[in-house]
Amino acid sequence: MDFSRRDIHSTEIPVLCRSCEVRHKGMCGALNPDELTLLSRHTRQLQHSSGEELVGESTDVEAYDNVMRGVVKLSKTLEDGRQQIVGLQFAPDLVGRLYATESPMTAEAASDVEVCRVPKVMLERLIERNPALRKRLMDQALRELDEAREWMVTLGRKTASEKVASLLMLIAVHLDPDARGDRRIFDLPMSRLDIADYLGLTIETVSRQFSRLKKDGIISITANRHIEVQSLAKLQSRCG
């Protein structure tokens, strides 16, 4: 029996929260029913289409978004308009830098996204009086820091083939972390242009590496974005 989800239909849990598939894994897993009830009175569940901006760089931070479904891409823009993707966030990540008055980057829906929007004041008030919530969000921040450092290695030292394999591995593992077995099926949440931008490669190089992985039987591709990883172990071996 999965005791981690035994209260999914409990009358103590707010109606807004009962159908949330990521509640136990994200920040809300550290809240008791009373805190969930208090939070649910101030939150809104929103849907964003692919390409829609959640928060703009340098805009005032008034709320945080807890990702329930989909992928959010984070980017920075230079003065001349050039943009660099600096990270991806998946369910149940919290989008936004805690305690910041301005957003340090742009958050945009890389795929269709569902989020639970939490007012900044309310969440920070809960953090101050709930050590478990504070620790859970700190753990997320530290995990993102570790992943950013690993990605620096990917961008700075890996070959083009290893970079593309590493990105596919990142998406395959994070989109469905509870999946079992050696196969994964997902839709790419990024265009070839975005992938090239994220990896520091040309679109042509990205396409060649996808073709090579397909030819070697590691992945199959349908309609340009539907990916089936035939073997995570083989994909991992290509990550360098």
Image: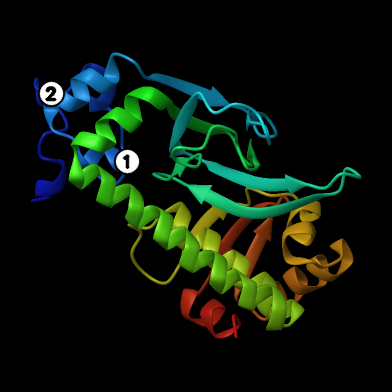
Image coordinates for residue 54, horizontal then vertical, percent: 60, 30
Q: Outermost residue toward the right?
A: 80
Image coordinates for residue 173, horizontal then vertical, percent: 45, 62
From the image, which quarter does the C terminus lie in?
bottom right
- How many other residues sit within 10 Å of disc 1, few (<14), some (14-19) or many (≥20)? some
| Front residue of this view, candidates 232 and 97 | 97
Residue at the image point whose x is 73% and y is 69% from the top = 210
Estimate the spatial distance between the alpha carbons at disc 1 and disc 2, rounded to whole Å. Answer: 18 Å
Residue 160 can be seen in this image: yes
Image coordinates for residue 206, horizontal then vertical, percent: 79, 67
**Residue labelled with disc 2:** 34
Q: Residue 196 vs residue 225: left or right?
A: right
Q: Outermost residue toward the top?
A: 41
| Front residue of this view, candidates 132 and 222 | 132
**Residue labelled with disc 1:** 22
Q: Amino acid at mark 2?
A: Asp
